[in-house]
Amino acid sequence: MIKVLIVDDDKLVRKGISSAMPWNEFNMEVVGEASNGAKALDFLKSQPVDLMLTDLAMPVMSGIELMRAARQLYPKLHIVVLTLHQDFDYIQEALRLGAIDYIAKVQLEKEQFEHVLHRIHTRIDGLTNINPRMPSQNEINVHYQNVYALVSQDHKSDQKWPLELTSQGDEIRWEVERNSWMWAAPQYGEEQLFNQLKESLDQVPQSTLLVLSDVQQRTWSQIKDWIMNYTETSLFYAYNPHEQVIAVSMNEEYTFSKEPQDEDIDRIKKSWFQTPWAHHDSYYNQLIEQFKSLQLRKGQLMGLLYSIVMEWNHLFARTTLGKISMIHSFESWYEVEEWIKQTAAGIRKSDEKTAYSQEIIDAVKKAVMIMQHDMEQAYTASGLSQQLNISRSYFSQCFKDLMGKTFNEYSRFIRVEKSKEYLLNTNNTIFWIAERVGYTDEKYFSRIFRELTGHLPSEYRQLGR
């Protein structure tokens, strides 16, 4: 006898389904009712249930939340969704979570009762014949040599997971998390399982098939946690749409890197701004390796790239050297590297629009970075041109053409811009600020500041606050 639990926040719906449908004709028996997901879980703890019919929109705990919990706690439980026509998105989510069918309430008429129950009974019979007993999360794996995990890097769209793969009766499967599932099969069925999962890679966007070894004598919970940890750390960097099968071992630990040191971040920024990486493969590869070697988390990497883009655009967006665009989100290092390639192409295109050689363009960029990062030094066009091994007059001409300001105008501009930050964000004296931006004479600094802003530093601070 198939034991049935009906879950719906509408008492009339529960009573109607319980009393009106011909359960006995299909070897079914309604053993309980619940008005929300939390009460349903309490009922499942108290007595066995084979089939649960659940509404999706309920207070306290929704049907989707109930399904997630029930699938983890009771893998053999069959679930059918009760829904309305407009719940299409929820239906897709429910089917993805393992619902075997859905019933539209508005279509429930007496003449359809037998048809609905026959369809559900047939599916339960089919699944019972091919699905093995699912082990508990804390059970130790002794039978399966490998575990196969299908993981998607796409966290935005709903995947259609290939849940019904083969007719082998000894396979097991679990949902690891929203974007990944894992399978295991006995040795005689592993090759078939692997081939079918490999063929299904095209169905799941941005997917990778992990072949996980050294899984015996581990609990299924440990295996699941390992897959989640690997997905959050190393897979971010390992994902490649052209190499979608990756062999990994549970004997290897994959953990997040430590917090990046300031000198590591400074080294990457120096490579970005002071080497011709956009034009030379050797510098490009060096920059890529510097990024990857840090193994930054996604959020850390996003922050670093954002700061680089902001600094670049602050320096060059209004010049002939051009602006670069930031990607709004990414799910893998592969996407980041594609963005870096596109950025390099954009920088080359901007550089090609100028009449100067790449050597001169790189020299001007280097001069800008030197001035920006050491404002206390009173750099001159003569001193920097000598340092860069360019004649003073030619350097001054190139600088004005590329940056849109003469060397002296640009020098005053960046010093005043930096002093604005100090004035608004610190309580330091005007003399202290003047020294930090390269002026030893406070009165001269105030005069330059008023020429460019129309206000004395003290007035600017007062207006800003």
Image (tube, rainbow, N blue to C red):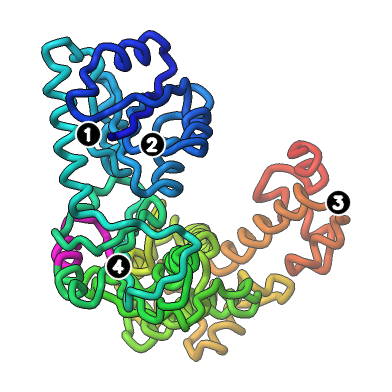
User: Residue placed at 35% from the left, 89% from the top?
Assistant: 282
Q: Which residue position is annotated with label 1?
A: 101
State which tag comes first along the sequence, 4 or 1. Answer: 1
Considering only vertical position in the picture, is 25 above or below 400? above
Question: What residue does disc 3 label?
Answer: 427
The nearer-to-camera label among 3 and 4 is 4
Sequence-first tag of 3 and 1: 1
Name the image quarter holding residue 194.
bottom left
In the shown orientation, is residue 441 left or right of residue 239? Answer: right
Q: Which residues are magenta?
A: 196-208
Image quadrant assignment for residue 205: bottom left
Label 2–label 1 contact, CB within 8 A: no
Return the disc, 2 or 1, that comes first in the chain's sequence: 2
* Mark 2 vs mark 3, CA separation in Å: 69 Å
Q: Which residue is mark 2?
A: 49
CA separation, marks 3 and 4? 64 Å
Quarter of the rendering occupied by the N terminus? top left
> In which image quadrant can residue 375 be found?
bottom right
> Disc 3 marks which amino acid?
Asn
Disc nearer the start of the sequence (2/3): 2
Tell me the SS state at disc 1. strand
